[in-house]
Each structure stands twice: as structure tokens, then as C-alpha cells.
Image (cartoon, helix red, strand yellow):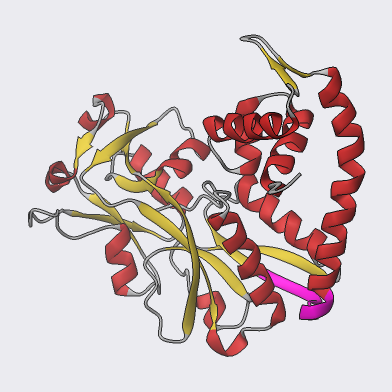
Amino acid sequence: MGGLEIRELECFLVLAEELHFGRTGERLYVSQSRVSQLVRALEHRIGARLVDRTSRRVRLTPLGEDLLGTLRPAYAALRGAVDGARAAALGVGGPLRIGFQGVVGYGFMDVVGKFEERHPGCTTRLTELPLSDPFGPLHRDEVDTAVVLLPVAEPTLVLGPVFSVQPQYVAASRRHPFAARAEVDVEELAAAPLVGVSGPAPPYWREAQAPARTPGGAPIPRGPEAGTLQEGLSLVAANRGVMLLCRPTSEYHPRGDVAYVPARGLPDSALGLVWRGDREGAAVRAFAEAVTEAVTGEALGGGTEGGG
């Protein structure tokens, strides 16, 4: 048992529920190959196969079934003891208001769920933030912490863990020439009006979501501005301009009148957890810790999926 890795046990428990390597990887926020590595490591440690895997299905071996029956209550007791001690040490309680941009993906919701299990005295409240005002709710004390698209350069805000680094896509009307392309080079944006972000969002942030120039220095025509993601996609569908989005947002918003095309030459988008430095209470620190654990444990890749 020397050197036993908790991550191997977690992977086995999730695989026993899902009986699917791909779905197990999604729940743990790791690749399918990483799931296979963790299972093989546990089998090597035990000295026998725990899982039978064919091209059609996955099932536990008799030894795997026996291990599952013993491991489940032991693991639950272990996590309960650690989480209870942490909650007592931090004194976390009361509501935690979490803002988010775009779509709350299942990955981020799993982090929220684990946080609530770890701190049963703390209840979370989720609030969608408008695309046009990512930081206003924090400044106005409407939320305690928020998941926003980077960059963040607000002097009163603290940038915590960064996650969900994703390639960018161009959203274009099905009538637009880009719609038939396999990919769009960033320099080609000089020929297409780009939908921007309206409202009180800081200029540096709006520029990052809808740049005025290509990396090569060519000016990008300004298209209409949108205050919400849905407004932006409606403008795109009407062929009023194209819009830059991260990959998960394109996957969460399929539309028959909009095509999502990979953009070559643009930096990846990313999300960050932010909060006010003067409002950093125990609950905010504990939630930031939970997100950091997910990131450092190869756990949070999808996170919440933001637009932009």
C-alpha cells in the first residue's frame, strides 16, 4: 500500500459508476488516456485486473466489484473527515454569491458541488453576468466572486486561478464566405466587420474580445456592438458581422444559421476567478482553493464556458 495515490482510487470509483472511459475523463476533467493510466497504475499496485474493457463495453472484474464494495464507504468516510476538519478550521458558512459569464458547464458545477459538500454550512448562489459588464457586479458588491473572461486589470480585484484555456473560433452567418471554410486566418478578419462588446466593460477588456487590429497591424472593421452573447449571435446570424468565441461557447450554442470556424493565429481565451481584495472572506478563499485544486489536479478544463 506504500505510495497509494488517492487520484487512482477516485478514478476507479468514477469509472465504476460510468463504465465509460470518456465520461470518466469528463467528470474528472482529464483525458481518456489519463484515465487509462490511473486505472493501470491501481491494477499494477494491486496485482490483478480490476476492469475488463472491450470495444463495446467496460465492466468490472469480480475483484473490481469486491474492491468497489469495500472502497466506497471507506473513501466517503475519509473525505468526510478531511472536509469536516477543513470546514471547522476555515469557519466557512453563509451564502457565497458566484457570478459567471456565458454558460455554466457541468465541469464547473461539479466543483461547486464538491465545495458545498466540503462546506455544508455554506450555500452557493449563481448569477449570470452580462457580457457587457463583467466586473460591475463585483464592484457593486452584487457577487462575492466571479468567473470572467481574461484579461483582468482592475486594481481593486484579485485574480485567482486561471483555467479553461481554449482556442478561439469565428462565429459567422451561414451566408458569410467564412462559413464554408475549414479555418480562418486572423489576418483575414481585416475583411470582416467584427461584433464588439457594448456597455461599461473596460476598454482594454472590450479590445481583447474584439481587437481593432490583426497581429499583423491591419485594421479590423468595427461591426455593431452587443451587450449579451445572444445579442451578438443574433447580429452574426443577420450577417451584420462576425464574432470571436471560445470553443466551448460554440459547442454550447449550436445554431442552424451560424457557423463556428477555428481561428488560426489568435491567442487562446481563458477564464479566471476574481474577487474584491477588500471582500476576501473565508468562503471566497475556500472556493478559490477548491478551483485551484481542480486546476492543479488536471481537473478543470471545461470549467464554465464563457462567451467572447
- Residue at left 12%, top 48%? 190
**6 relative to 187 in the view: left or right:** right
**188 relative to 241 in the view: left or right:** left
Image quarter in which the N terminus is found? top right
- Residue at left 50%, top 77%? 136
- Residue at left 56%, top 75%? 137
**272 relative to 167 in the view: left or right:** right
- The number of numbered discs placed on residues in the rendered structure image is 0
Q: Nearer the viewer, residue 303 or 65?
A: 65
Q: Nearer the viewer, residue 63 or 188?
A: 63
Whether residue 224 is situated above or below residue 62 in the rendered picture: below
> Residue 291: where, in percent of width, then height?
60, 61
- Residue at left 75%, top 31%? 46
Would you say residue 128 is visible in this rendering? no
Give the farthest residue toward the bottom.
278
For the record, the magenta segment spans 88-97
Q: Quadrant of residue 239?
A: top left
As for residue 96 lying within the magenta part, the answer is: yes
> Residue 182: where, in percent of width, then height?
26, 26
